[in-house]
Image: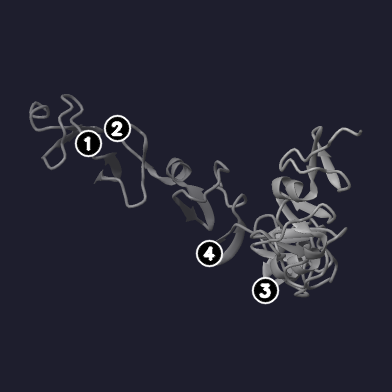
Amino acid sequence: MAERVDCTECKESLYGQKYILKEKRLYCIKCYEALFSSSCEVCQKVIGCTSKDLSYKDRHWHSECFLCNKCSRSLLEQPFATKDDLLMCIECYSNEYSAKCHACLKTIMPGSKKMEHKGNSWHENCLTCNHCQQPIGTRSFVQKDGNNYCVPCYEKQFALQCVYCKKPITAGGVNYHEQPWHKECFVCTGCKQQLVGQRFTSRNNFAYCFNCFCNLFAKKCASCTSPIGGFGGSKYILFEQRQWHSDCFNCKRCCVSLVGRGFLTCKDDILCPDCGKDI
């Protein structure tokens, strides 16, 4: 007489019935599906032993329920994407969420090469120079009035030429005396340091930084021999075509300040009344 074989869960005899072996244990179909089968994400019904169970990220579907949420096309053996837990075929996903080409307004499909600039996207072959019509690719370009130009075409069409080096100015120019300069070309005539962002002045149409202008053209103090200069003017004393810093206008002997006081002269020296009384 054959040994009795029962379902591990319900203890019913499996003689003459279909059963499933799992981890060396036998289950009738009903118990196996109740214990181990998953429910379909779409129809919420159990995915039985005789049905194909399709799974993705711990979610399960009947093969007939595994469809695009937008067009209801079967996703079996097809690439797909998800958005907010919804399944979509690549075409629907791209039409719904992928970037649109700024030129042709068509969807840029996933996997296609995409060019981006300032929030806009293009197909690789749609990003072209408005003048020469050649694809820009990874080259630098300039936007003007909503159009894109490769750098050579932009320079030929629109760019100003630097007064100093005669080369086109594509960015970061300076306008001085109604003439365009590159920032790096707008330098002090004396020391050649860039003048952008610092005080400067000009003489005979040449630009000078503060230090060079003072050293080259400013009057020298009769006492310390340093330049008397400054935009807005340093305080100075003028007497008989000689100049002094106000801090340097002191008695030659006792060094008391003579600003606002009477003084005497002896040869080229300036003296206070006390020091000059014996002259």
Q: Which residue is mark 3?
A: 146
Q: CA distance from mark 2 to mark 3?
A: 63 Å
For the N terminus, the quadrant is: top right
Q: Which residue is mark 1?
A: 249
Depth-wise, is mark 2 or mark 3 nearer the camera? 3
Q: Which residue sits at x=69%, y=59%?
A: 41
Label 2 vs 3, first from the N-terminus: 3
Question: Please, what secondary structure does the residue beneath circle 1 have?
Answer: loop
Q: Are the two marked residues, 3 and 4, in contact with CB atoms closer than 8 angstroms? A: no
Q: CA distance from mark 4 to mark 2?
A: 37 Å
Q: Is residue 141 above or below residue 105?
A: above
Q: Are the two marked residues, 2 and 1, in contact with CB atoms closer than 8 angstroms? A: yes
Give the amino acid at mark 2. Answer: Ser
Between 65 and 106, the one lying in front of the other is 65
Q: Which residue sits at x=66%, y=74%?
A: 145
Q: Are the two marked residues, 4 and 2, in contact with CB atoms closer than 8 angstroms? A: no
Q: Which residue is mark 2?
A: 223
For the C terminus, the quadrant is: top left
Q: Is residue 97 left or right of residue 198?
A: right
Give the amino acid at mark 4. Answer: His
Any part of residue 277 in sight: yes
Give the amino acid at mark 3. Answer: Gly
Q: CA distance from mark 3 to mark 4?
A: 30 Å
Label 1 vs 4, first from the N-terminus: 4
Give the amino acid at mark 1. Answer: Phe
Q: Which residue sits at x=55%, y=41%?
A: 191
Q: How many C-alpha atoms fall within 10 Å of the one at disc 1: few (<14), some, or many (≥20)? A: many
Residue 215 locus on image (x, y percent): 44, 40
Residue 157 locus on image (x, y percent): 74, 71
Residue 177's label in the rendered image is 4
Q: CA distance from mark 1 to mark 4?
A: 38 Å
Question: Please, what secondary structure does the residue beneath circle 4 have?
Answer: loop
